[in-house]
Amino acid sequence: MITNTELEYKGDLYPTKIVSYDHEVDSVSFYTDNSVILKVTVLRDSLIRFRFTTKGYFSNDFSYAIDKSHTHGYNFLEVTDEDEYYQIKTSKVKCKIQKIDMRLSIFDLNDCIILEDELGFHWEESYELGGNIVKMSKTSKDGECFYGLGDKATQLNLKGKRLENFATDQYAFQKDQEPLYKVVPFYIGLHNKKSYGIFFDNTFRTYFDFCHERRNVTSYWAEGGEMNYYFIYGPQMEDVVTTYTDLTGKPELPPLWALGYHQCKWSYYPESNLKEVAAKFRELKIPCDALYLDIDYMEGFRCFTWNKEYFPDPKRMVAELAEDGFKTVVIIDPGIKIDKEYFVYKEALEKDYFCKRADGPYMKGKVWPGECNFPDYTNPVVREWWAGLFKELISDIGVKGVWNDMNEPAVMEVPNKTFPMDVRHDYDGNPCSHRKAHNIYGTQMARATYHGVKRFAYPKRPFVITRSAYAGAQRYSSSWTGDNIATWEHLWIANIQMQRMSISGMGFTGSDIGGFAEQPSGELYARWIQLGVFHPFCRTHSSGDHGDQEPWAFDEEVIDITRKFVNLRYQLLPYLYTMFWQYIEQGIPMLKPLVYFDQEDIQTHYRNDEFIFGNQILVCPILEPNALGRRMYIPRGDWYNYWTNEYCKGGKEIWIDTKFDEIPIFVKAGSIIPKYPVQQYVGELEFDELSLDVYYKLGKEKSVVYEDAQDGYDYKKGRYSFLSFQTNGKNNELIVQVHKEGKYDTQYSKYKINLIGLPFAIKAIQIDNVEFLFDRETLKKESYLIVDKGFTALHIIGE
Ligand code: GLC
């Protein structure tokens, strides 16, 4: 019996006993005598959906989050009727459903319990709103840890926390502040060295409680809709995350330039100011690929217009910037100014595209332009219209990317910061109130924008960034974490947010480097850049009202550090692009928290700071002022200090000294890290060599390098180059084997092979079994070889 808890409302209702069941192909439905139906659908052996209704029938099955092309199909499914329970068995798990109360538990095939209902499904009827508050509680196991849930500004392991999902414009949010901009109702549980995932696909306001209310209970509930969740079995966290990402969808590859450095401010104007910023980057030789126009480029904040005083000839300006390698990205918000002379407003009004209040009038609220109406992006006809609006910006003017903001949706000067809950939405033919559509509004806007930008950017790839998002938004857009603050605490938050977004399926994310609100010191800015270049999306942005935040707003030392780290990012572009490719192909997160990297090592379970960038680079930011170094945990395995090439054995906490122009970076032994030369923007240089940093390891290791034309869609027709390297280190020999796939021929003809950590002096080198002549003295001094690409085996033989 549970007593004294907030959860135990008097009015809660529970399923009674199961009176019948039926089994149809991949689904088994259980019926109670109080009209509850539980429908269990086996999508994959390790992916099972649980859907409950209390009405005796299910409403239309519709989800914005689930990617229709997700993988499904199972190897084995068996349903048995036991004395006290029904059992559904797949080739990975067994699920038992108790006849007496419909509570369920899931085991692996060794009868190890993975997930178990505490109260299980229960609900509270809401007379006033209609429908139910739907609730679920599970027992939590000793030592269980919890991860995921998107952009939460709290420690990585969510144990002990209660979190709320309601997309909110949370200007200058604080650590632990809830709720934030994004809604990803997906978490990963880990106990007994096994991981599983829960995706609660419900767009109403949801809550998750991880042993906060009660020590051994995890619960989640929603203010409406269905109890509808997916269980994903690991046992590795990678299995959970890749399955979740496959279920909710993966993006396409972005253009490579989108992985370069971006510079933003609220706002660069007029044209001469933007041009000065551009020129300064080139003068100081700090690489930069994209410049952003915030709301002031518009005429009175009217979307799809230009302020002709500030930007008299946008097409010419965008073209001139492009000649110097800069792509122009512009902001587009959802609020459409109420103005009878404004073409977007007029058309939307004529066609009845704006959201309406319950009693009929259009939803009216203040945003930057003053009073606005808001398109209902949950209506497919409206999305199609919206997509068409991008023609001029993209096709005619040459803008390369679009930035969607304020799409929680944000409304100013009202206490709840958003629409009233009675606002109506089409919800793709499932009409509903804002209670249900709120959390999905931003994603549907980003989706419409993505289709528009893609249509007009074709045959190039689109680039879209959004502030608000629901699970699945990664299919359409990158994102940033909203209005942070220039404080050391926010640097800590940004580091965790990006790791968390990565394992929540939404990897193409970054923070406003340096902080949006307030002014960073040079030291804070430098430390932020040092972290930010290891985030998939890398952009400096600031509110602009506290001073400048371009690298040159700080002293020479900070400028040099910025250049050094942005240069490093540009060198690592092929590595970064390869990790993106693994994300879009396999759903592998680009950043890996240490617990993801090695869940069996309990030392990793509460670590926040260190993470793996891609598969092979360990990064640990400096998060405090005046640091001369820091303590950090090196995960198990063999590593090399990136700066000194010193070998370091993992599985221990160490103190590491750092200078101001360094942060701790380690490379996994056995790795081959590809590098391009530093370029001021993607595609600036033609080069004839790909650098390969080869880190010796005793034993075998695999590395891969994905490349293509860096933009466009030919990669989908096989025009890519995929190199897979295998290193095999022995006591006095190192063998590197290469296998190439794909029809794309890279521009370079040679590899520059940098040999790091060889424990022997080189006696001979063979390439495809042919003796390779080299100058002993030079090799000794420089430790690199230049060889023609296209070989399959390189043997380095020791004395
Ligand atoms: C919001 C955005 C911010 C933007 C500003 C003005 O605060 O989060 O990035 O600069 O609006 O458009």
Image (cartoon, rainbow, N blue to C red):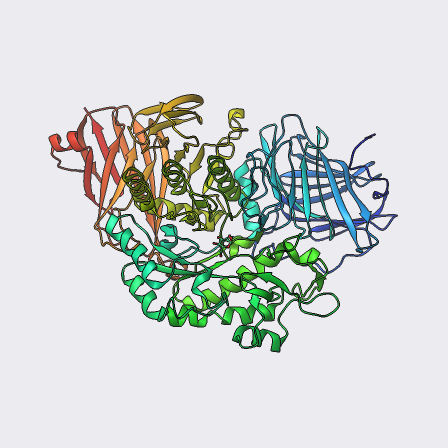
Q: Nearer the viewer, residue 346 or 555?
A: 555
Measuring from the top left, give residue 39's x and y in whole percent.
74, 50
Residue most extreme to the right: 33
Q: Left or right: 719 with respect to 52?
A: left
Quadrant, the C terminus? top left
The answer to which quarter of the image holds residue 661 is: top left
Measuring from the top left, give residue 117's x and y in whole percent.
74, 36
Q: Is residue 26 above or below residue 725?
A: below
Q: Nearer the viewer, residue 77 or 59?
A: 59
Q: Nearer the viewer, residue 618 or 579?
A: 618
Q: Is residue 462 above or below residue 756?
A: below
Measuring from the top left, give residue 717's x and y in whole percent.
39, 61
Q: Is residue 82 visible?
A: no
Quadrant, the N terminus? top right
Measuring from the top left, give residue 465's x and y in whole percent.
48, 55
Residue drawn 85% across the image and 38% down it: 100
Residue most extreme to the front: 546
Q: Is residue 646 visible?
A: yes
Q: Left or right: 580 with respect to 57?
A: left
Q: Nearer the viewer, residue 519 or 531?
A: 519
Q: Is residue 673 above or below residue 62?
A: above
Residue drawn 30% across the image and 49% down it: 287
